[in-house]
Amino acid sequence: MAYAVHFAGAVLACWLTAQVLAASTWTWRAPRVAIVCWQAVGLALGLSAMGLPMALGLTAYDRPTGGALLALADDLGHGTLPAGVTTVHLALVGVGFGIGAVLLATTVRSVHSTVRAQRRHRDLLTLVARRDPTIPGALVLDHPGAAAYCLPGVRPRVVVSAGTLSLLDRAELAAVLAHERAHAQERHDLVLLPFTALCRALPWFRWVRAAHDRVALLVEMRADDKARELHAEAPLAGALRRFAAAGDRVTPAGALGMGDRDLDVRVQRLLVADRPPRLLGAAALAVTTTLAALPISLFLS
């Protein structure tokens, strides 16, 4: 029972940590560190959600979950089970494996649907997009709306619309292109993928959906930082303001768009030159890494 308590405590700690991270504004000053913290919380939650029913079903073995599972498999192979192991206990172990299967299946399904949408849109771009020698490395889509997005993948595409070209000046456009290239270089689509899978696998946890939204915002802030390193904050802030004022913003499925999230917050953040909170970030990393290590150790023991 002690190991089930450990897993239950880990689930509670994930919830508490997620509440603290979601309410914290220091994460805006260190988005890369905050993303790693969220990933650790997501890993801990997924493993703990699997481990809790397993540990409840394996109480008779009185050992860490990994060793108890091996012992159960050995007993099942010999057709003998220890006293106290009932059908209910075996069903609880099955629930744990079922949660793991759902997590894996939703991850695979998320990958498949995203890749399919990206492939469909990439094929469409070959038909309707054009290259512009004044905008190297990007495709231009003849659309009046404000659109600037990265279509990630092995061969990423950066796309801007004709409406965006008429909306931005050259410095602002250069900052926007740097933002989108940052999405492609750091594979932010893969950063978001586990949280998309958790949302589908654990829909009854409202804070899991909130975590997805928070990580999506941090991904945009991280790309903003990369663009600011190359082009300063003024052109990027100006571009964000123009996107906020534009009524018709377009981002297709499977893409990461410049104007998707919290534009006003991102503008204010760019204009305030706060230094990253190194000590606070290091403490958050230590806490979330420990949180992820607990269920891992229980499974490997």
Image: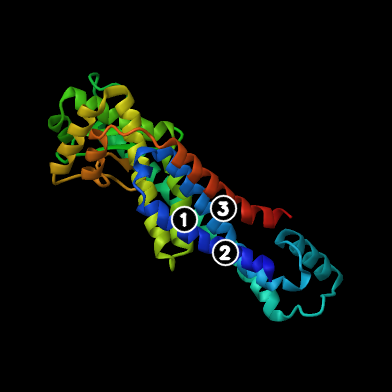
Mark toward the start of the polypeptide (1 vs 2): 2
Which residue is at a point 48% across and 51% down the rendered structure image? 194
User: Callout 1 environment at 10 Å: few (<14), some (14 to 19), or many (20+)?
Assistant: some
- The residue carrying mark 3 is 291
- The residue carrying mark 1 is 17
User: Callout 2 environment at 10 Å: few (<14), some (14 to 19), or many (20+)?
Assistant: some
How far apart in space, not on screen, are marks 3 and 2 (Cα)? 10 Å
Q: Position of residue 38 (x, y in %)?
A: 46, 49
> Mark 3 touching mark 1, by CB under 8 A?
yes
63 left or right, relative to 271: right
- The residue carrying mark 2 is 9
- Secondary structure, mark 1, is helix
> Toward the viewer: 72 or 106?
72
Amino acid under disc 1: Thr
Which residue is at a point 64% across and 73% down the rendered structure image? 92
| Residue 153 against residue 13 in the figure, above or below | above
> Toward the viewer: 253 or 38?
38
215 left or right, relative to 236: right
Which residue is at a point 28% across and 32% down the rendered structure image? 273
Q: Is residue 101 shown to the viewer in this render?
A: no
Amino acid under disc 3: Leu
Q: Position of residue 258 (x, y in %)?
A: 27, 39
Amino acid under disc 2: Gly
55 left or right, relative to 105: right
33 left or right, relative to 159: right
Quadrant including the C terminus = bottom right
